Image: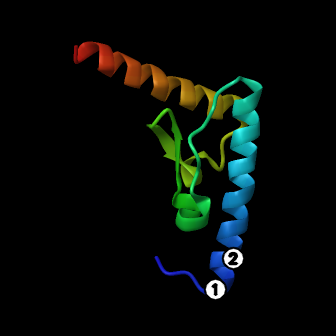
Amino acid sequence: MTYSRRNRVEEQQEACLKTKQITDVCEQFHLVLDPIDWQQFGMWAPVRVNTVEIASLLDLRQHESKDMLRQIQSKLFEHAALHVESR
């Protein structure tokens, strides 16, 4: 999808805001996110915890805090289970 300059600026603003919201929620629960490159990827920027990809900013934009944390927790448990199985 191509963006006009105006849409690109709006997407960058939305991505910056969403990154801050996600970071604030995670900090409350002592979860440290990997850096989110919203400047390069906009809303398509991946959200990761310890290199485990949780979702894109776009996928998380409609979630409330508790739903977002549930999704992060689920992805981390899934990753841990797969890591244990591979041993």
Q: How is the image coloured?
A: rainbow
Tell me the tag on residue 46: none
Residue 55 against residue 73 in the figure, above or below: below
Residue at 35% across / 16% down in the picture?
A: 81
Q: Position of residue 61 (x, y in %)?
A: 65, 50
Label 1 residue SS: helix
Label 2 residue SS: helix
Q: Quadrant of residue 63?
A: top right
Q: Position of residue 13 (x, y in %)?
A: 73, 66
Q: Position of residue 78 (x, y in %)?
A: 40, 23
Residue at 66% across / 60% down in the picture?
A: 15
Residue 38 against residue 80 in the figure, above or below: below
Q: Position of residue 21 (x, y in %)?
A: 75, 45
The local crowd at label 2, few if under 14, some if 14 to 19, many if 20 or more residues have their Cα within 10 Å, is few
Quarter placement of the C terminus: top left
Give amino acid for label 2.
Val
Residue carrying label 1: 5
Total numbered circles:
2
Residue at 77% across / 27% down in the picture?
A: 28
The local crowd at label 1, few if under 14, some if 14 to 19, many if 20 or more residues have their Cα within 10 Å, is few
Report the front residue among 36 and 44: 36
Residue carrying label 2: 9
The reply to whether the C-beta atoms of the residues labelled 2 and 1 are less than 8 Å apart is yes
Residue at 75% across / 56% down in the picture?
A: 17
Give amino acid for label 1.
Arg
Residue 5 against residue 75 in the figure, above or below: below
Residue 8 placement, left or right of 25: left
Residue 46 against residue 53 in the figure, above or below: below
Q: Quadrant of residue 8?
A: bottom right
Q: Quadrant of residue 82?
A: top left
User: In whole angstroms, how far apart are the C-alphas of marks 2 and 1?
Assistant: 6 Å
